[in-house]
Amino acid sequence: MKPSEVLKILHLLSILVISNFTFAQFCAGDNRFSEIEYFPEEQIESMKNLVYGNAIDWQGNPVDLKLDIYYPGLSIDTIPGRPLIVLIHGGGFQNGHRTSLTVECKEFAKRGFVAATISYRLGHNPSIQNDIVKAAYRAQQDANAALRYLIDEAFNYKIDTSWIFMGGGSAGAITSLNTNYISQEEWDEVYPGIVASLGELNNSGNNLNHSFSLKGIFNNWGSTFGSAIDVDDMIPMVSFHGEDDQTVPIDSAATGLFGSRAIHHLLVSNNVCSDLTVKPNAGHGIYRLIQGKQFRIGRAICFLRSLFCDDCSSFYTTDSIPASCSAIVSQIDLTLEQGWNGISSYLQPIDQSISSIVEQLGGSFICIQNLDGIYYPGGSFSTIESWKLHSGYQIKVDQDTTFRIDGTQPDQNVLRIVPGWNLIPVLSSVPSNIDSLFGDNLYSIEIIKEAVGIKIYWPEMYINQIDSLLPGHSYFIMSQDTINASF
């Protein structure tokens, strides 16, 4: 037996042990698996264009099936097995690409998940009756192949295969639901002869034979055949759907399809946890902009956390209720002077939308910026939308004022500083002495200056006007090297 095969077997055995204390591990009292970031983006690693299989497309051509995977750095994350979520893009089984879900994958990874986005075989002939059914079948074949591949790679990415979730939007949500509910036998009833035409569900794409079981569905405006939903197959589901969706109806249809609300009622009536957000007067595809994505992801992650903690309860709403499952909320009060100010927060805001954070300033607010861009509603353009904990900011107001940030204390206060200029926050509630903060790395620092102000630390010129970095302030730092600062 090859050493790599031995390692995989040992990992699968370890998963059996890990599963016994998953509740304690995934349901800890920290902010992992909550609506707020646990790992900063620079600690997220990825592998792209991984080939998980090969299959024949609708035109008879062999195609490689690929996926991208995102996860907290293997050397940073101490948990031996992380939950996996597989995301599948929409596009009517005709269009779309896995990279459209890159943002979602990163957001899940920043909260502690291993997240994969997959490509699958697209295309069908609209002029041929029920040809789209074949496309849906091929998509389910590919989803199964991707799951088998990821289980096979569980050791390499520290995946706990006892906690696998699947989700997507539109055709991706349909594929996720079909993967859980529609068996080979049920497909044979819906489309006799489909195996002779396309092969079986579980032996297409690759030769791996791993079995899998999904623990929940992240359903965004999807549906599946109602007759296929057996009580024994029901699993928890968190869903989002526009009430006036004419593409994938939210309720049951004459075709036998059950939309999100029909499935929700069926699950709840059978005591299976389901969380559904319905947007009134909305059509196909809701909460698609970055703030909407963060809203859906936050709700989904808190729902999945409730499964880890074994305290899930069903919920139905027509309001946009933000998620809240993080640790105890604190607050920081910032004092602003008329004009420009350098600010930061050592708390991760509960609502990370910059527009929401500055809304309390009312008409006194003009703009806010960092090195990534600017939020300037009065100028009719904005290039940043979300507050980044590991960034300092400059804000401009037209009068002296104060405002408050409600948030949670992050579990890690390590700041990565790159070569060149950085605009950094102060990730501490008390002043941070420069010598203590940077230690041996201090020699890499060329200049520290107030983001707004004249005080400067410039050792080469024997200028030392800054002894400590003050909470709530931000600073420009010029570094020669990539270094870490631990507050």
Image (cartoon, rainbow, N blue to C red):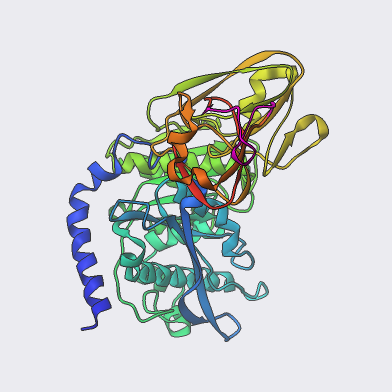
Can you see residue 63?
yes
Q: Quadrant of the N terminus?
A: bottom left
Q: Is residue 201 left or right of residue 380?
A: left
Q: Quadrant of the C terminus?
A: top left
Q: Is residue 51 left or right of residue 305?
A: right
The answer to whether residue 466 is magenta is yes
Residue range highlighted in magenta? 452-468
The answer to whether residue 302 is magenta is no
* Residue drawn at the location 44% of the way across and 31% of the way down: 324
- Which of the pair 123/215 is nearer the observer? 215
Q: Is residue 82 above or below residue 200?
A: above
* Residue drawn at the location 51% of the way across and 37% of the way down: 277
Residue 81: image quadrant is bottom left
- Which of the pair 135/213 is nearer the observer? 213
Q: Is residue 74 above or below residue 283?
A: below
* Residue drawn at the location 69% of the way across and 27% of the way down: 454
Where residue 23 appears, x then y in whole percent? 24, 43
Residue furthest front as drawn = 462
Can you see residue 222?
no
Residue furthest right as drawn = 379
- Which of the pair 445/163 is nearer the observer? 445
Q: Is residue 214 left or right of residue 126?
A: left
Where residue 361 appears, x then y in whole percent? 67, 19
